[in-house]
Amino acid sequence: MGNKKSTPGFWLEDSGGRSGRGRHEAWEITGDPWRLRVSVIRRFCSLALRGHSERAIDILKDLRKICALEDPEVQDADSFLVDQKTAGYITRLNLLLKQQDPESLQMECTNFIRHLSPPASVCGKKRFDFMLAADFRGLEALSLCGAMLKDKELLKLDKVLDANMDTMTHLDLSYNRLTDSGLQRLLPTLQKMQTLQSLDLVGNYLRKEAIDGLVNAMADPSAFPCLTQIALGNNYNIAVMPGSMCELLLARWPPHAREPSLTELATGQVTIVEAVDDEDYEDPDIAALQLV
């Protein structure tokens, strides 16, 4: 079902007569993937709280599919979940439904919705237009989270990225409407950024085919020389990061920093921490006591 406002598609197919038995709910992404997932969670919560456990279980199965957790690659030993929290929420909701704990279930649904939704503080379209008009140089971080920008608008970023090629370390493009083709057109600029360490692409319109483009670009050691974190969760059907991409990120890890696990790299929740020799390490708590 299409929608001019790019909202999630949803419809009911009722094949069970007046009693409502046999009702089947079908879902289709026609807009922001995260909005559809939130709609499904709300539908699940409504059914569960009204005692329709069987239908709620069916909705939960649908949610796993909509979050791409049924993808065979999820079970691949060489792939790593990009959003372990989503998988954990679905598991806990299933358990709470069986335990018939409505209060905890409702709270878990609320937390799940918060996890999938843009943060409260987001970048507006006006701020984006102002940034393009101004001549910003020396930026270390740029956040366009939640600006809901499409490919055509995001491609205007080239000017800003070129001006900050040697200083920007963090770029947040989460919760926009970047597609595979838009990312492909941004890649030539992104891969020339000499200091970029983290790239947040959560909550866009990307599909798992976009990962191939990223892997191909990163195969060149001179591309993204400092990139160590890519966040890919909550897109259309990206559930895992292949081990090959994790290895490419790890190859760019600073030599004197503690190396994370491949799972940590896939979730994009790691921080570069410089290694410290045991002989030179001083416990800050002990140091503070010595000053008293």
Image: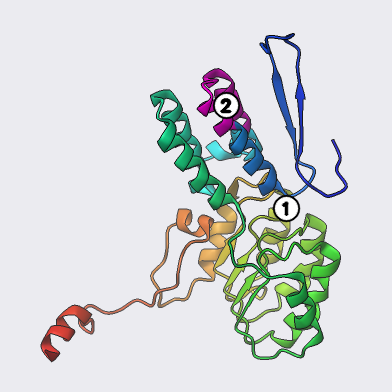
In the rendered structure, find residue 181 and report the number of the disc placed on it.
Answer: none
- Residue that appears at 73% across and 32% down: 27
Which residue is labeled 1 in the image?
206
Nearer-the-camera pick, 287 or 21:
21
**Residue 178 left/right relative to 55:** right
- Queried whether the magenta region covers residue 183, the answer comes back as no
Expressed as whole percent of the image width and height from the top left, the position of residue 14 reads: 75, 17
**Residue 76 left/right relative to 126:** left
- Residue that appears at 64% across and 42% down: 37
Q: Which residues are magenta?
A: 44-62
- Above/below status of 95 relative to 51: below
Expressed as whole percent of the image width and height from the top left, the position of residue 46 reads: 57, 31
Callout 1: helix, strand or loop? Answer: loop
- Above/below status of 246 relative to 257: above
Q: Residues within 10 Å of mark 1 (few under 14, many from 20)?
A: many
Q: Amino acid at mark 2?
A: Leu
**Residue 186 left/right relative to 42:** right
Expressed as whole percent of the image width and height from the top left, the position of residue 62 reads: 63, 30
Which residue is labeled 2 in the image?
47
Q: Quadrant of the C terminus?
A: bottom left
